Structure formats: C-alpha cells, structure tokens
Amino acid sequence: MDTQSGTLDEALERLHATGPEFRGFLSNHGPMAVEALVRHGQARTVHRWLDRYSAELEDVPSARERITDANWQEALGDPQRVTDWTTYFTHAVAERPWREVLAAWWPRLLPGISGAATHPVIRVGHAVRTLLEEGEEEPRIAELAHAVGYWAARHTTLPVTVTPSGTASPAAALEALPHVLDQQVSVVQGLAQLPGTPGWAAAAEAVAAPQDPEAARDQLAALVRAATHRYVDYAHGDAILLVHAATAPNAILRTLPVLPRPLWAPSLHAAWAACAALTSVYSPDEALPPLRAGSLTPEEVFARATAHGDAHAIKLADTALDVTSWTPEGDDRALAAALRSQELIPPEG
C-alpha cells in the first residue's frame, strides 16, 4: 500500500468512529474532503486537517432496531435510524460485491437524492471513485456502506416531479429557471416553495431528454460544467449550498460506470432535478463581477483550496479540476469557480 492510500484508509477509519452529522443537522464532510485531498496530492495535509475538523464531530448515534430485507421500507428516510442503515449496508457489502449492492439500491435511493442537501449522494460519489481508482481495501468498502446508509436515512423526495422533455441544454435550462420568492431560508423551506413558483415545473422540464445511455452521460457532464460555471457569477446567493448544484451531479457522473446502463438516464433526471431545485432556491438575480483564474494551474488552484481549509471549497475545487480535465485547453471558468468559493466561504482555522 502506498503512503497516500494508507493515509486515506487511516483517515476513513478515524471518521467511521464519528456520526454522519453533528450539531443536529450539519453533514460530516470529512470522508469527502480527505478523499479529494489525497486524490490531488495533498495526503500530507490530511491528518492535520482532520485533527481540526474532527473537533466538531460527534459520536456514532445509537442503534434503534435491526433493518432487514423485509422491513427496510419502514426505515427509509428516517434519520434516527442512520446507524441501523449503516449496519445493514455493512453486512450487505460483506455478503455480496459492493457493485451488486449499489446497483440494487440505486433505483430505490435515487428519488431521495435531495435529502440532507444532497450530501449523501456526494459522499457516495467520492466512495465509488476511490474504489474504482485506488482499490477495494476494507476501509473504502466500509465507507461506501456508511455513505449509502446515510443516503437511506436522509432519503427525501422533491415536492414536485420533473420529467425532462424539452430541447434545451443544461446551461440554457439553468439560466431560464425562475427563482423562489424567499431565498433566505433553509433547504427544506426553499424546496417547499417550488410547487408554488410560477413556471418552475415547465422550465425544469424544458431540458432535453437523452436518447440513449451515452447521451445521458454526456448531458450529465454538461450539467456539471454548467453548474460549475454558474457558480462564478451567482455563488453569492449561497456560497455553500450552490456548491452542491455542481458536486451532486458530479457524484452521480462518477458513479455511472458501476451502474447498469438502463439506470443512466434516470440518474441524469434525478441529478438535473436536484441541481435545478438548488439553483432556483439560491441563485440571485444579479451577477457578481467577473473572475478569472488567469495563469494559475489546476494544481495551484487546488493547493489554494487546501490552504483555505473549508470542506466545501475543497470539494468544489475537486469538481472544478474534473471539469478542467475534460478539454485539452482546460477550463478557466471552472477554475474561477473554485477561486470564487475560496473568496466567499470563510476559511477554516
């Protein structure tokens, strides 16, 4: 095991002794942030970062009642059962290949992507990327069980159904979305306004529907790029929650390779609905002044995110580097989005 992989496994083992939330509702970003730090060559900073971050975390919640294949529907979406769910999935991935478990549960969990402001699916995406690219060590499989368990416990459906049926690109569709009346609210309160927002459903459904799995994958990548680019102009609406408009679709994009192809289009639909909802709830009308990355390299941008220290800034930089890597010429606006998050989100430490 190389030093970087060992550092990640040590960090995950530390984090699995803590709960997925703290202070009542804040998500534990530790597993996602440390995975991104290790991936981008910042393994030496992980334990120092975790020492500071873990001071805020809480113990694993007490178990309530065993979840089984017969009674799981009763516990779906119950945050009080999060430890029961983690136990269930820990046993599941011990008995069957993790890919098989994830493929079986993906269509059950996908409608609840908006739970906990999309943090659970983002955590799943980081876990899957590690398993695919770094190997299937036990702490990494355990992390997938924790991530999927958190998603099951926080499973929350949107209050409006979105069925893409138009011709618009993700970028054009995001631009055309109407905004909710009151944006100074929690995620739950913001989402509750969507059904009463004039024209929202029609605008959300104007995005093009993919014709095949490859088109769904490409459109999902286009959505990640569009949401990342929009962050440069509109992040001041909510610099933290609008991070998720980009990182949640990217988590699903990272997971597509292990999913059956018939699930790719539904995955795009769910990602689009969650991204559109967050965009409408938190995007302001006026754009910020332009910002450019200039001569900064992707590595330098991520190093700045590491020094900044906030988990959301680290995760957005991670997604920005993905977007940048998709074209030979790079992507200045994606890197600028990472810099914008460092500008607007208070630094840690």
Image (spheres, rainbow, N blue to C red):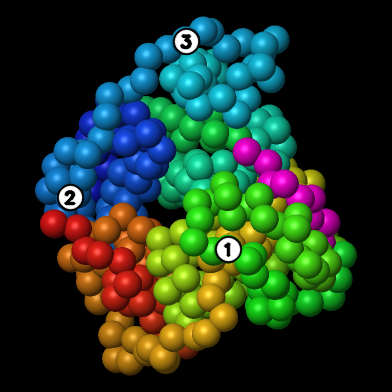
Label 2 vs label 3: CA separation?
32 Å
Q: Residue at x 28, y 53 (%)?
A: 38
Query: Marks 2 and 1: which is nearer the front?
Result: 1
Give the number of the disc on residue 33: none
Magenta residues (range):
156-164
Residue 293 appears in the figure = yes
Identify the mark nearer the N-term, 2 or 1. Answer: 2
Instruction: Please identify, in this view, whether the residue under mark 1 or under mark 3 is nearer the observer.
Output: 1
Q: How many marks?
A: 3
Label 1: how many residues lie within 10 Å, few (<14), some (14-19) or many (20+)?
few
Which one is in front, 2 or 301?
A: 301
Which amino acid does the dot numbered 1 rest on? Asp
Q: Residue 10 falls in which quadrant of the image?
A: top left
Q: Which residue is mark 1?
A: 182
- Residue located 68% across and 41% down the image: 157
Contact check, label 1 and label 3, Cβ < 8 Å = no
